[in-house]
Image (tube, rainbow, N blue to C red):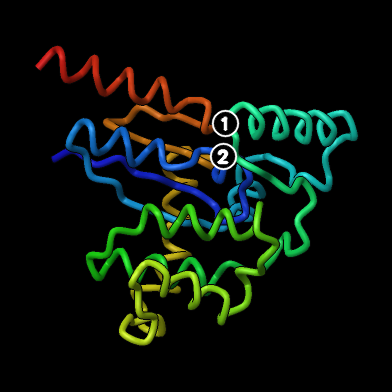
Amino acid sequence: MKTIDYYFSLLSPFTYLAGLELESIARDHNLAIAYKPMNIGEVFGQTGAVMPKDRHWSRQEYRLQELQRISEAQNMPINLKPAHWPTDVTFASSVLIAAANAGKEVGPFVHALLKAVWSDEKDIGDMSTVIAIANDFDINVDELSIDSPDAPTAFQANTREAIESGVFGSPFYILDGQRFWGQDRLPWLRRTVETSSDSN
């Protein structure tokens, strides 16, 4: 079974607006997904990108307009200036990694964490908030090895791996060496998968 390497930040509004389309593509074509949350600030710093707050006003305004357009087109409510953004996502990312390592289906959990930031005005930097969201998906944080090297260390390793793999934004998808950046590239990812399937 082929695997889509999915690099993303739990602070990214464009990742939130991707919804569960990636999971749909994987399900339709019998693909696995390797969920790889990363530190977007470090990725930006190492790849020449600028954090939103430091961009020219024209880029900042365009970003907000684009997010609003996508939100309306997909009927996904978004708060363009969420109360708890940015926040520390190390714990949330570690829970996600540990849950995936434990064999949990984490796609809906990832989306719920993103929705918490960009729609529900919740702070996923708060441990109790993350635990409550995890419980909604039958993920018991107490049963996961959050404090083991496999979780926080993996978050750092994902970030290094992302940079080494040519990732420079979120969401970012890699399949068979083909890189796709942004939720608006998901149709191209689907097309690539379908074309590859047709040729086999």
Q: Horizontally, is 130 left or right of 99 in the view?
A: right
- Position of the N terminus, as image quadrant, is top left
State yes or no: discs 1 and 2 in contact (Cβ < 8 Å). Answer: yes
Report which quarter residue 55 is drawn in: top right
Circle 1 residues within 10 Å: few <14, some 14–19, many ≥20: few
Residue at 40% of width from left, 20% of height from top?
188
Q: What residue lies at 55% left-to-right and 70% top-to-bottom?
A: 90
Secondary structure at badge 1 equals: helix
Q: Residue at x 60, y 52 (%)?
A: 40
Q: Is residue 32 left or right of residue 72?
A: left
- x and y percentages locating residue 70 in the rendered image: 64, 29
The residue at the far right in this view is 57
- Amino acid found under the numbered disc labelled 1: Gln
Residue 149, image x, y percentages? 36, 79
SS assignment at label 2: helix
Query: Quarter of the image containing the C terminus?
Result: top left
Q: Is residue 151 above or below residue 167?
A: below
Among the 4 quarters of the image, the one containing residue 164: top left
Residue 161 picture location, percent across and down:
42, 52
Amino acid type for the residue under numbered disc 2: Leu
User: Which label is found at residue 74?
Assistant: 1
* Residue on which disc 2 sits: 17
Residue 15 at what x, y percent from top left? 54, 43
* Towards the viewer: 107 or 101: 107
Looking at the image, is mark 1 or mark 2 nearer the viewer? 1
| Residue at the far left in the pictured view | 200
Mark 2 crowd level (few <14, some 14–19, many ≥20, 10 Å Cα): many
